[in-house]
Amino acid sequence: MKKFARIIALVMAVALMATLFASCKKEDNVLKMGTNAAFPPYEYYEGDKIVGIDAEIGALIAKKLDMELEIVDMDFNGIIAAVQNGSIDMGMAGMTKDPDREKSVNFSTSYATGVQVVIVKEGSAIKSIDDLKGKKIGVQEATTGDSYATSDFGEEAVKRYVNGAAAVQDLQNGSIDAVIIDNEPAKAFVAANEGLTILETEYTVEEYAIAVSKDDPELLEKINKAIAELKEEGKIDEIINKYIPAE
Ligand code: ARG
């Protein structure tokens, strides 16, 4: 009888270990962040490495979650769907928290602010938002710049590009008249290209946040907690100030 009990205990111990081992393996420790790494200073390539504000904040969030960050580069247009179908755990791409997207995904608390601005050629006749009427406007596809431009100036006015750099290139060679894009990438593109300038008038102010599947409220909660802690520790400001030195 004693021997029988010992065997049972042994079998149970082995079964327990097997279960623990299996659950460890299943719960892979990688936090997959989907982004579009053509958006300096939030995400861009330095050699073959993706760096920037989002890459660094993402890494700190993963660390707080005891996970390892894996950054997946994709078209901006595909990020929301990738969050929805679970091929990435979070979308972090200088992405604006916006009511339309909130129908498809949940957003974390905001970690940064963005402003939509207008880039034109130096000496352009376009001096204000109103002057954009009847002009050809370049945007990155599926961005808020795209939706503002489309709703304010009409489908025919808008030319969509896979990234901001391609739009800026077309602005430079004269095939479009303006580009609507977030202010920090705008500054980076203007700095990297001759003869461009940003209009003084700001188009809209937005909040950047992380997109998480509606099926994973637990992850959202953990991310929000991590963001709150990082804010409190001054880490978010530190990273933003590193990439965006105060003028
Ligand atoms: N803030 C804008 C939006 O959410 C543009 C973001 C583009 N981000 C990028 N990584 N290309 O629509």
Image: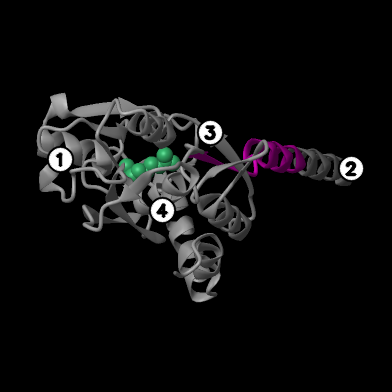
Measured along the vertical axis of the image, is residue 226 above or below residue 81? Answer: below
Query: Which mark is first along the chain, 2 or 1?
Result: 2
Query: Mark 2 vs mark 4: which is more N-terminal?
Result: 2
SS for tag 1? helix
If you read the primary sequence from the N terminus, does the residue marked by circle 3 or circle 1 appear first?
3
List the residue tagged with mark 3.
73
Are dots 3 and 4 in contact, CB under 8 Å? no
- In three-dimensional space, the C-alpha distance between marks 4 and 1, rounded to whole angstroms, equals 21 Å
**Regarding mark 4 in the picture, which secondary structure is present there?**
helix
Q: Residues within 10 Å of mark 3 (few under 14, many from 20)?
A: some
Please name which of the two marks, 3 or 4, marks the residue nearer to the observer: 4
Q: Which is more N-terminal, label 4 or label 3? A: 3
Q: Which residue is mark 1?
A: 132
Q: Secondary structure at mark 3?
A: strand
- Of the 4 image quadrants, the one containing the N terminus is top right
Instruction: Inspect the image, locate mark 4, and give the three-letter code of the amino acid beneath it.
Output: Glu
Apparent side of residue 53 relative to residue 121 in the rendered image (left or right): right
Q: Which residue is mark 2?
A: 3
**What range of the chain is rendered magenta?**
16-34
- The mark nearer the N terminus, 2 or 3, is 2
